[in-house]
Image: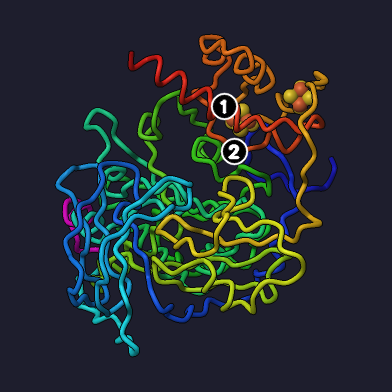
Amino acid sequence: MSGKTAYKTFKGGIHPPYNKELARESAITPCPVPAEVLIPLTQHIGAPNEPLVAAGDRVEVGQKIGGSEAFVSAPVHSSVAGTVKGIKEITGFTGAKVKVVAITPDAEQPDFAKQPGKDVDSYSDEEVRAIAREAGLVGMGGAAFPTHVKLAPPKDKPVDMVIINACECEPFLTCDHRLMLERPTDLVHGLKLLLKAVGARKGIIGVEANKMDAVEAVRAAAQGETDITVEILDVKYPEGAEKMLIFALTRRKVPPGKLPSEVGCVVQNVGTAVALYEAASWGKPLYERVITVSGPGIKEPGNLLVRIGTPMSALIDACGGLQGEPGKVIMGGPMTGWAQPDTATPVVKGTSGVLAFTADLIDVADEHECVRCGKCIDACPMFLQPNFIVQAVKKELWDKAEMWGAMDCFECGCCSFTCPAYIPHVTYVREAKADIAALKKR
Ligand code: SF4
Ligand code: SF4
């Protein structure tokens, strides 16, 4: 016996330096309202929204400004009271062009006018789904899948369990940790609404072992809730990936290409559960969120409550600005986030972090030939063969790339992290996915 406590986990994964201490102790504070917000009309996976406002219109905080009749979609709302300047096209955080509503905020911003909702226990399943949709809720861990769609699994796939992904396994990020410490009761209420929506009897909040204060806070908030437990997971990346989390907590395996409902589960992020509580209790749509601003390139790392559409530069300024020679700014976590060439890019519903790194910390080593060490295979939580996928892509053998599992890769980056040859596997996988999909369309 090593004496080390064995927490729930999965096979594979990596242990990058976590650097959570930079922002962990920083309580959530509001980010100042910028001179202009650029609110992307579509911030979800699914059908695009159409604008519901035009240049010159007055808008209030929480007013719906974009929507679609399609089922797989989520409306967007104004994050400020102000005047619409117009609809324009900008480069979004993924590098693709996106349509945004540009709004000049009023000098004074009124508080959101809370409308009293019902007690969380008295909502019906349909009502919860309708609230989630109307509030524009999406997965706030990054994937931005519309919440009401996740809460309507196929009739032949009954869901008996809702899991709150409270792992926050990416280095530097602490926004979910702070939400659990500062608003544990709202999280529990959000989970009760989620259980109601899918008719499940068991709710699990899965937290990594490096947040024991959050475990205590949420356990205290959930006392007396017989359907809800708080479970502790190993500190390992990507413990919070949906399939890994479900397996670690339940030993249920989601088959390749299938959704969690296949094994009776629905997984939601901490921020999404809290936002659902706000929508049901106060009528508040998702127009702001907590974002971690951190990294060695930030003077005073912290956790900010930010209005959607605020440029990254305003978040950085609110945290004392940049320090050292600028190297890289990332939207999201360091493992799955997107490097940004311009800090004017606005934050969206799925933005969990804004990270800055100094030039000396940026690894610019060139890619070498594979030395067949097998480290990428050991690290892959999906049990794929990342080295073989890369070889197949290099030879444009798309059927082979698919055979080695390119389409099952969820781009966690564990393989690249461990590779001594600095091979950017995820870049190759993305190329393979695009080409395989294009070939199948023919
Ligand atoms: S192949 Fe995909 S799933 Fe496997 S480690 Fe690499 S990025 Fe992660
Ligand atoms: S970790 Fe890199 S060098 Fe090692 S087998 Fe995988 S691709 Fe090759």
Quarter in which the N terminus is drawn: top right
User: In which image quadrant can residue 106 be found?
Assistant: bottom left
Give the camera-side residue of 233 and 386.
386
Q: Is residue 417 visible?
A: yes
Left or right of 346? Residue 207 is: right
Residue 241 counted in the magenta span: no
Say what amino acid the circle numbered 1 marks.
Val
Circles 1 and 2, Cβ within 8 Å, touching? The answer is no
User: In which image quadrant can residue 190 be found?
Assistant: bottom left
**Residue that badge 1 annotates:** 429
Ligand 2 position by quadrant: top right
**Residue that badge 2 annotates:** 412
Say what amino acid the circle numbered 2 marks.
Cys
Q: Main secondary structure of the magenta part?
A: helix
Beta carbon of the mark 2 residue lies under 8 A of ligand 1: yes
Beta carbon of the mark 1 residue lies under 8 A of ligand 1: yes
Give the camera-side residue of 345 and 274.
345
Residue at position x 65%, y 21% from top? 390
Q: What element carries label 2?
A: loop
Residue 126 counted in the magenta span: yes
Q: How far apart in space, not on screen, are marks 1 and 2 (Cα)?
A: 11 Å
Q: Is mark 1 on a helix, strand or loop?
A: helix
Q: Can residue 381 be seen in this view?
A: no
Residue at position x 48%, y 24% from top? 433
User: In which image quadrant can residue 115 be found?
Assistant: bottom left
| Relative to 310, residue 125 above or below | above
Residue at position x 48%, y 60% from top? 345
